[in-house]
């Protein structure tokens, strides 16, 4: 796959400092954006204003990427939402796992209204390199690699990032009404490593996605797919999300998965999940079982 496009927006922490910093990443280094205290502050700008704001490289001192801790590119009141059953693969997987209501997923796949659900508040989102979790009361758990849209307060898509929508197949399979428990829990959402501006991605419907899960240092499962098989239009998903809610600090909308490891595969503690999306970035997270210790970053 190609390397990430230059000048992505990042949220990071310098060594020895507890304070998050907003900046840009280019050529293996990060540079702070002067006058910007949060990414949420940028999502108050319209798309053309944001592009103008980022047109001039910051004149601060670049810091090597290896010398900072990258944080999840979500802060303030920005929430993460997600779409489901947006790919044929996802529909088949949900039908397969459902014991009593497989037709629910068949119906929503072609319905005018997409499936949208809340995934995480900003402070609970896991960043690159941080642990994601699988529930202690679940028996079958999978990562779901997804292209995520970064949407400003005006409903404009301003960037793209990678989301790992970690999910319990066994819990949701018991009953579709258990979806919040299968999707929204400690350690169930990771986003990063940065935000690639929308103008740096010529065609979001032609992005290769690769998922690799390593166990004991070796690949345990891997697969590739493409956003070309997305069943929904991105603006359609955003439009439905913005119909009934206000997002003053913008919102991250994960657009559904096209790669689902089939049964009997399940994540186990010690696994590492690698998600790579062409032109967007690579998100890597180790896996633990049970509650993930969280603290506002």
Image (cartoon, helix red, strand yellow):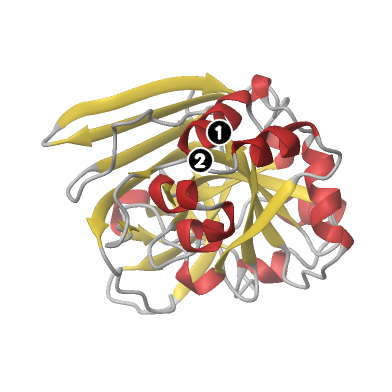
Kind of element beneath mark 2? loop
Q: In this picture, is 231 found above or below 8?
A: above
Name the residue carrying label 2. Answer: 98
Give the alpha-carbon distance from disc 1 to disc 2, as whole Å: 5 Å
Residue at 65 percent across and 38 percent down: it is 105
Residue 207 percent location from the top left of the image: 60, 24
Whether residue 27 is visible to the viewer of this picture, yes or no, is no
Residue 84 percent location from the top left of the image: 63, 43
In the picture, measured across the screen, residue 178 lies left or right of residue 171, that is right
Residue at 38 percent across and 30 percent down: it is 261
Give residue 288's quadrant in the image.
bottom left
> Residue pushed farthest left?
216
Name the residue carrying label 1. Answer: 95
| Proximity of marks 1 and 2: CB atoms separated by less than 8 Å | yes
Q: In this picture, is 112 found above or below 122?
A: above
Kind of element beneath mark 1? helix
Give residue 131's quadrant in the image.
bottom left
In the picture, measured across the screen, residue 13 lies left or right of residue 90, that is left
Q: How would you rate the neighbour count of disc 1 (Cα within 10 Å): few for under 14, some for 14-19, many for 20 or more?
A: some
In the picture, measured across the screen, residue 107 lies left or right of residue 290, that is right
Residue 266 percent location from the top left of the image: 29, 40
Q: In this picture, is 188 found above or below 76?
A: above
**Numbered badge on residue 61:** none
Give residue 76's quadrant in the image.
bottom right
Residue at 40 percent across and 30 percent down: it is 211
Residue 135 percent location from the top left of the image: 32, 60
Of residue 149 and residue 290, the one placed in the foreground of this image is 290
Q: How would you rate the neighbour count of disc 2 (Cα within 10 Å): few for under 14, some for 14-19, many for 20 or more?
A: many
Of residue 11 and residue 86, the one placed in the foreground of this image is 86
Residue at 67 percent across and 20 percent down: it is 228
């Amino acid at each position: 796959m190609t390397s990430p496009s230059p000048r992505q927006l990042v949220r990071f922490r310098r060594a020895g400092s507890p304070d998050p910093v907003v900046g840009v990443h280019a050529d293996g280094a990060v540079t702070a954006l002067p006058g910007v205290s949060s990414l949420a502050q940028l999502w108050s700008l319209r798309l053309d204003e944001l592009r103008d704001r980022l047109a001039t490289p910051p004149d601060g001192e670049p810091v090597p990427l290896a010398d900072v801790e990258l944080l999840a590119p979500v802060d303030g009141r920005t929430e993460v939402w997600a779409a489901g059953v947006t790919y044929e693969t996802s529909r088949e997987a949900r039908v397969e796992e459902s014991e009593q209501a497989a037709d629910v997923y068949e119906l929503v796949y072609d319905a005018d209204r997409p499936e949208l659900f809340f995934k995480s508040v900003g402070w609970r989102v896991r960043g690159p390199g941080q642990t994601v979790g699988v529930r202690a009361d679940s028996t079958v758990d999978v990562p779901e690699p997804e292209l995520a849209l970064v949407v400003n307060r005006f409903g404009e898509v301003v960037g793209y990032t990678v989301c790992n929508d970690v999910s319990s197949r066994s819990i949701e399979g018991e009953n579709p009404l258990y979806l919040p428990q299968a999707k929204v829990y400690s350690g169930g959402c990771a986003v990063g490593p940065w935000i690639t501006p929308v103008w740096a991605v010529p065609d979001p419907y032609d992005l290769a996605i690769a998922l690799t899960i390593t166990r004991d240092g070796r690949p345990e499962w891997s697969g590739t797919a493409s956003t070309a098989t997305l069943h929904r239009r991105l603006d359609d998903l955003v439009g439905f999300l913005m119909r009934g809610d206000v997002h003053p600090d913008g919102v991250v909308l994960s657009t559904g998965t096209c790669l689902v490891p089939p049964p009997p595969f399940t994540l186990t503690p010690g696994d590492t999940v690698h998600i790579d999306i062409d032109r967007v970035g690579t998100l890597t997270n180790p896996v633990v079982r049970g509650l993930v210790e969280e603290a506002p970053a």
